Image (cartoon, rainbow, N blue to C red):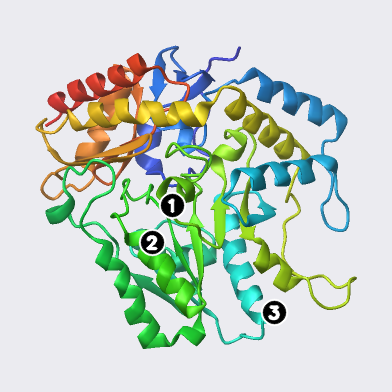
Amino acid sequence: MNTSAPNLSAFWMPFTANRYFKRHPTLVRGAEGAYFTLSDGRRVFDCLSGLWCTPLGHGRREIVAAVREQVGELDFAPTFQVGHPKVFELAARIAGWAPEGLDRVFFTNSGSEAVDSALKIALAYHQARGEAGRVRIIGRERAYHGVGIGGISAGGIAANRRAFGALSAPFVDHLPHTYDPGQMRFSRGQPTWGAHLADALERLVALHDASTIAAVIVEPMQGSTGVIVPPVGYLERLREICTRHGILLIFDEVITGFGRLGANFAAQRLGVTPDIIVFAKAVTNGVIPMGGTVVRRSIYDAMMRGPEQTIELFHGYTYSGHPVACAAGLATLDALEKDDLVARSAKLSKVLEDGVHSLQGEPHVIDIRNIGLAAAVELGAREGQPGARAREAFERGVEAGLLLRFTADTIAVAPPFISSEEEIRNMIETLRGVLRGIA
């Protein structure tokens, strides 16, 4: 094995302070189970399942075997005017995981592409029904919907929008976010306050007129902005308003799909069925990039009009439904089902909840939030140095054997479903020590 240090200059790293990283690099050379191996040989616990995408842990033999076999059998096949068996098989399997009525699957290569595809499908659906005036998309403050133009337009993270505002799609508005620390601080699971915040959608309907609104897109749980959990009754209220005004409701489940909240999708855990679900990340356990949308059958059927030989949706990607990604996806779903890992995620959720909330009162902790097998610890910012305290926690975490995820001054954890209860408790206790050691 070549253990010499690589030249770090050529790679422009995504969502990274490149200059800082290249002075203080953290390099990973291997992974197995719930652990990464760093370039110096140390093992660190994977506290965020990669980037929310490896719930089965790393190096799952059945997924590795499926990918190897698929590369040898069929390394690529187009899905424009041609198909291959595994893409249809995986679509049917995903439809079986989704809420009843959502059973048509459109594949992409990432969550960002899946969001943009969902928005295009929403617009095309209304056009097919003779309501071409429904062109407006309603997103939400603090939302992360990837980095496509549709996603950053509907998204609500200021830094993602600021630099690219000139490219933003027109006809987009935003709901207020649902986080109020005065009412929700240290909530366990869904806060009991805040359902009324959904009524802001009625104000946007009054402002723009329902006849101009195509869809509302929200994350059931906002992960990238720091595990913001929906208030009890909030999503139900959004669903009711959308139904009454003929507006499609889209759930961005790129993070929550395939078991993160202890159910197949957050829609099932939270008891609210949208019209479109966006998925990615865990569908292949992060082994091969893949994303997609699961669409209510009535939306698909509305598009299937006109001459039979006519293309119904002028949209797609070269690698939509790539055979190697499909093989990884099928092996991932097999493993999730065989080992009953969604139920295991639900069981471990209580261990994580009790553990993470035991950090209340530790230095710098100003809030803790959790739902399912995901949680966030928010730290008070250093005066004039936003993000510095969480970065120090990240660096001390690596030294202590944890690979944490931080955004601004919030530390997020979402361990693999294969984690043991002991590993989760150890993660919390190690984090406690980290917090006690930072200034």
SS class, disc 1: loop
Quarter residue 46 falls in: top left
**Three-letter code for the amino acid on which mark 2 is drawn:** Glu
- Spatial CA distance of label 2 from label 1 is 8 Å
Q: Is residue 234 found left or right of 303 in the rendered image?
A: left
**Crowding at mark 2 (Cα within 10 Å: few <14, some 14-19, many 20+):** some
Which label sits in the foreground, 3 or 1?
1
Disc 3 marks which residue? Answer: 128
- Spatial CA distance of label 3 from label 1 is 29 Å
Disc 1 marks which residue? Answer: 271
Do tag 2 and tag 1 residues touch (Cβ < 8 Å)? yes
- Sequence-wise, the earlier of marks 2 and 1 is 2
| Residue at the image position 12 percent from the left and 55 percent from the top | 182
**Whole-percent x, y for residue 344 in the image:** 45, 26
**Three-letter code for the amino acid on which mark 3 is drawn:** Ala
**Whole-percent x, y for residue 126 in the image:** 62, 78
